[in-house]
Amino acid sequence: MKAVVQRVKKASVKIEGEIVGTIEKGFAILLGISETDTEEDGKYLSEKIANLRIFEDSQGKMNLSCLDINGDFLVVSQFTLIADCRRGRRPSFVEAARPEKAISLYENFISILKQTGLKVETGKFGASMVVEIHNDGPVTIILDSRER
């Protein structure tokens, strides 16, 4: 499971011109799920992200987590994170989880984040979405559950 975590001042996701999720200060999370991922991968990543200390403290050091600042989460599924671009010019998505498996793991990831008590907004799994991200810093972290 891969996640691109962006520290944001605000972020939103639209489907067919309608805003379906919006947050203020927190993390915009683009989540990619592969065929080999399990609920353990989702648990690991969600806990890692909730406790990721990339917000500045009073001395300007990245020392605070989303939990510390009472931030928000916007989670958007993005199977293209699982793309394999090693051969040719067209990405291969054969390692991306099939929707039947991926939606369950996506929902499990969201459920674990909600247990923090912080605001969690989402896009819609499988929908064509427009994501507006106001990256703060910019700070962007890439996490892969296979690299623990």
Image: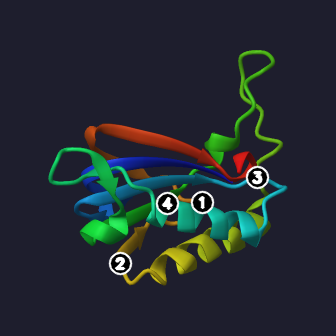
Residue shown at 31%/60% (left/top)?
Answer: 26
Q: Which label is found at residue 126?
A: 1
| Disc on the earlier residue, 3 or 2 | 3
| Disc on the earlier residue, 1 or 3 | 3
Q: Which label is found at residue 118?
A: 2
- Expressed as whole percent of the image width and height from the top left, the position of residue 42 reads 66, 66
Q: Is residue 43 left or right of residue 77?
A: right
Q: Which residue is mark 3?
A: 34
Amino acid type of the residue tagged 2 in the rendering: Leu
| Disc on the earlier residue, 1 or 4 | 4
- Applied colour scheme: rainbow
Regarding residue 94, the answer to whether it shows in the image is yes
Residue shown at 54%/61% (left/top)?
Answer: 48
| Disc on the earlier residue, 4 or 3 | 3
- Expressed as whole percent of the image width and height from the top left, the position of residue 147 reads 71, 45
Please tell me how crowded label 4 is: few (under 14), some (14-19), or many (20+) other residues with Cα within 10 Å.
many
Query: Which SS class for mark 3?
Result: loop
